[in-house]
């Protein structure tokens, strides 16, 4: 089986490279050799390499920057996904697209959402980033409407890895630099180690019978998920254990209003991952175990 990977220098792209199954011949492309916003390049790359599957790990992921940089966000996260889908359809190629929990708004009809989101639940993104990713989902499904058996969209959340910029690495840096930190404690979700997500993508690449929208994150053990504050506490505990931090500092729980950001984020974006876990017959990875494994790589 031949698989083309886009965005290979990102968190997910890098983990895909580290975990490629031996039976798969993969070609890894980065933004300078395959700019997915260039429709002609996308078509010629897919036609020439003639893969069985494309895994799109490329994205515009700067959530706050996207608010002022809308055109770039929509170009990469929406239009380009349409180009990939069109080229895949023309060449009879399966497409694995990665999307986000930020397509949801965190609100139920009566207030805050308290039940993990199912793949078919109504979306209502609060940010440019979330909307651009949703538009990408839509363009892909429109392009593939008569080939609905040839794509999988995996929504994931709070992604981190030992490579690249992410919450875990930022927290470790700040915990070494500061004498205390305030962390948002009223946004709930589920972290996901990019290595676990890479494994899911490889499995989906080889399971042409699994099509449509799926959710995947690490498991938090409760419908409530965890807050960024809980996540930071877990990072500190593990950082001390693994010698990445010299001393603990006080972590203060703050509210979203005390930490204003350009982009609005859902107060609750926990996803129900049962559809994918059952289809692949896997036990969900526990968030603390995945965090420990990632931090072991750092130490
Ligand atoms: N990070 C998260 O917290 C998070 C949460 C939920 C979902 N996701 C989704 O998970 C997927 C993987 O995210 P990630 O964290 O691995 O992303 P990432 O680390 O930001 O990597 C994205 C990669 O995409 C590449 N890229 C950007 N524009 C491109 C273009 N026009 N053509 C080709 N490549 C381009 C970037 O390359 P350059 O650096 O060269 O531009 C970068 O290497 C994305 O679909 C993202 O939306 C992420």
Image (spheres, rainbow, N blue to C red):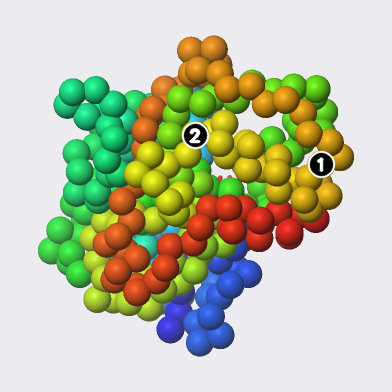
List the residue tagged with mark 2. Answer: 227
Residue 266: image quadrant is top left
Q: Nearer the viewer, residue 208 or 142?
A: 208
Residue at 32%, 64% in the rendered image: 276
From the viewer's perspective, is residue 253 above or below residue 25? above
Q: Nearer the viewer, residue 231 or 83?
A: 231
Locate the C terminus and report the quarter of the image it occupies. bottom right
Q: Is residue 259 left or right of residue 133?
A: right
Residue at 78%, 34% in the rendered image: 248
Q: CA–CA distance between discs 1 and 2?
A: 21 Å
Q: Nearer the viewer, residue 212 or 107?
A: 107
User: x%, y% of residue 5?
Assistant: 50, 65
Q: Is residue 263 visible?
A: yes
Residue at 58%, 53% in the rendered image: 288
Give the residue furthest to the right. Answer: 246
Locate the N terminus and report the quarter of the image it occupies. bottom left
Q: Which mark is residue 122?
A: none
Callout 2 secondary element: strand
Residue 169: image quadrant is top right
Q: Are marks 1 and 2 in contact (CB under 8 Å)?
A: no
From the viewer's perspective, is residue 286 above or below residue 278? above
User: x%, y% of residue 135?
Assistant: 29, 40
The reply to whether the residue tagged 2 has its Cβ within 8 angstroms of ligand 1 is no
* Mark 1 surroundings within 10 Å by alpha-carbon count, few (fewer than 14), some (14 through 19), many (20 or more): some
List the residue tagged with mark 1. Answer: 245
* Mark 2 surroundings within 10 Å by alpha-carbon count, few (fewer than 14), some (14 through 19), many (20 or more): many
């Amino acid at each position: 089986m031949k698989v083309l990977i886009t965005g290979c220098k990102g968190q997910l792209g890098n983990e895909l490279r580290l975990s490629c199954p031996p039976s798969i011949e993969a070609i890894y492309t980065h933004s300078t050799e395959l700019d997915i916003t260039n429709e002609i390049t996308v078509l010629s790359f897919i036609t020439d390499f003639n893969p069985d599957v494309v895994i799109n790990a490329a994205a515009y992921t700067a959530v706050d920057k996207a608010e002022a940089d809308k055109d770039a966000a929509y170009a990469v996260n929406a239009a380009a996904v349409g180009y990939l889908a069109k080229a895949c359809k023309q060449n009879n190629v399966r497409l694995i697209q990665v999307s986000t929990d930020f397509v949801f708004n965190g609100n139920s009809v009566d207030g805050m959402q308290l039940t993990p989101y199912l793949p078919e639940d109504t979306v209502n993104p609060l940010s440019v980033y979330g909307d651009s990713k949703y538009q990408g989902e839509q363009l892909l499904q429109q392009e593939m409407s008569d080939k609905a058996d040839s794509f999988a969209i995996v929504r994931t959340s709070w992604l981190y890895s030992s490579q690249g910029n992410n919450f875990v690495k930022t927290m470790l840096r700040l915990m070494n630099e500061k004498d205390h930190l305030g962390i948002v404690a009223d946004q709930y979700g589920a972290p996901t180690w990019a290595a676990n997500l890479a494994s899911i993508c490889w499995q989906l690449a080889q399971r042409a019978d699994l099509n449509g929208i799926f959710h995947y994150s690490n498991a938090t053990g409760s419908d409530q998920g965890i807050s960024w504050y809980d996540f930071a506490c877990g990072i500190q505990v593990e950082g001390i254990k693994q010698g990445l931090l010299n001393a603990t500092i006080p972590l203060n729980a703050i509210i979203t209003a005390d930490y204003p950001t350009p982009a609005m984020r859902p107060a609750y974006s926990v996803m129900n991952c049962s559809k994918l876990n059952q289809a692949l017959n896997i036990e969900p990875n526990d968030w603390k175990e995945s965090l420990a494994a990632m931090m072991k790589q750092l130490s």
